Amino acid sequence: MLHLHPPPSIVSLNKLLSSIMKTKHFSTVVSLCSHLDSKGTPKPSLVTLSIFINSFTHLGQMGLAFSVMGKIIKRGFGVDPFTLTTLMNGLCLKGRTFEALNLYDHAVSKGFSFDELLRKMEKGGARPNLIMYNMVVDGLCKEGLVCEACGLCSEMVGKGICLDVFTYNSLIHGFCKGAVRLLNEMVIKEDVRPDVYTFNILVDAMCKLGMVAEARNVFGLMIKRGLEPDVVSYNALMNGWCLRGCVKMVDEAMRLLTEMHQRNLVPDTVTYNCLLDGLSKSGRVLYEWDLVEAMRASGQAPNLITYNVLLDDYLKCECLDKALVLFQHIVDMGISPNIRTYNILIDGLCK
């Protein structure tokens, strides 16, 4: 067709390329698009280049897909949400979800509306996929439109599209941000005073979502409001710092332990277990028994969670004899091992 005189219109060629792509012969589409692009007649349109990108993403060649995006920009075409969605979909298929989300954030900051794209696709008879819906749900949640995001999720379920972890993460983050707004509203009102329990709920939820910096700000606001944080407050914040097992974050958690003592708060078993888990995750197992001794000195008895952390680290360090002695000690103490204990033993003994 490309050798015909005159050559077929770009519209006709785009229809042909789309038909071939629907048969999943993506390499053929790439070859034809490359030939068409180098020939220059007829001149490839934005639709042609979008098909080119789509084929590269299905082949997992994201570098080449982005190079075509460069051509789109260089030739003065306006980048449309559909092309961006194609790139984001390709990144997600390659497991590069955070890069996809960064691209989404950049697109939204430039004024792109993915919600509008969904509606246009539906009117045109196309069926938006999970990735497209997730991007819109995430955008709505970031704008504080959590009710609208929930409505869109209901629409997804109604159309047989199952929500995944990214959908739920967006919703949970959205609800947390909504909770912060509610807290601010409570603070402004003189007749409604948030108490320590109010702040603890929010700090705990944020920490479990990895929003530790935000949780720390809420913790600071609680103190600024004249409220005294309790052991639960500190445990929630410590858990946030220890979850990732980063050395610097665990150091922050250890500083909180010092702060608790300065406030005359008595750390409980949950406090020490959280710190032990952080030390384990950050690879500082040598400090664990010092913490256990401090735990006993403060009158807090180690429990099965404590022993499971220690047992796991003994086996990771290949201290089999110590691990077996500790296991026998657990039994002798009248503590019943749980499924986690046996999984640790089986995993350690099989290595």
Image (spheres, grey):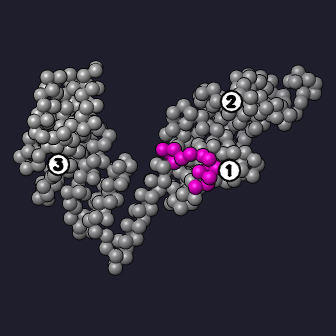
Residue 270 percent across, percent down from the top left:
20, 49
For badge 3, the amino acid type reads Thr
Residue 171 percent across, percent down from the top left:
48, 53
Magenta region includes residue 159:
yes
Label 2, secondary structure: give it. Answer: helix
Which of disc 3 and disc 2 is earlier in sequence?
Answer: 2
Dot 1 surroundings within 10 Å: few (below 14), some, or many (20 or more)? some
Circle 2/circle 3 CB separation < 8 Å: no
- Identify the residue under disc 1: 117
Residue 351 sits in quarter: top left
As drawn, the residue found furthest toward the right would be 5
For badge 1, the amino acid type reads Leu
Residue 228 sits in quarter: bottom left
Foreground mark, 2 or 3, reads: 3
Q: Observer-nearest residue: 175 or 350?
A: 350
Q: Is residue 24 above or below residue 166?
A: above
Residue drawn at x 37%, y 66% as measured from the top left: 183
- Identify the residue under disc 2: 55
Label 1, secondary structure: give it. Answer: helix
- Identify the residue under disc 3: 269
Residue 61 percent across, percent down from the top left:
61, 26
Q: Observer-nearest residue: 24 or 57?
A: 24
| Magenta segment boundaries in residue numbering | 154-167
Work out how far the residue at label 2 is from the one at label 3, CA to CA, in angstroms: 56 Å
Which of disc 2 and disc 1 is earlier in sequence?
Answer: 2
Residue 182 seen in this snapshot: yes
Work out how far the residue at label 1 is from the one at label 2, CA to CA, in angstroms: 20 Å
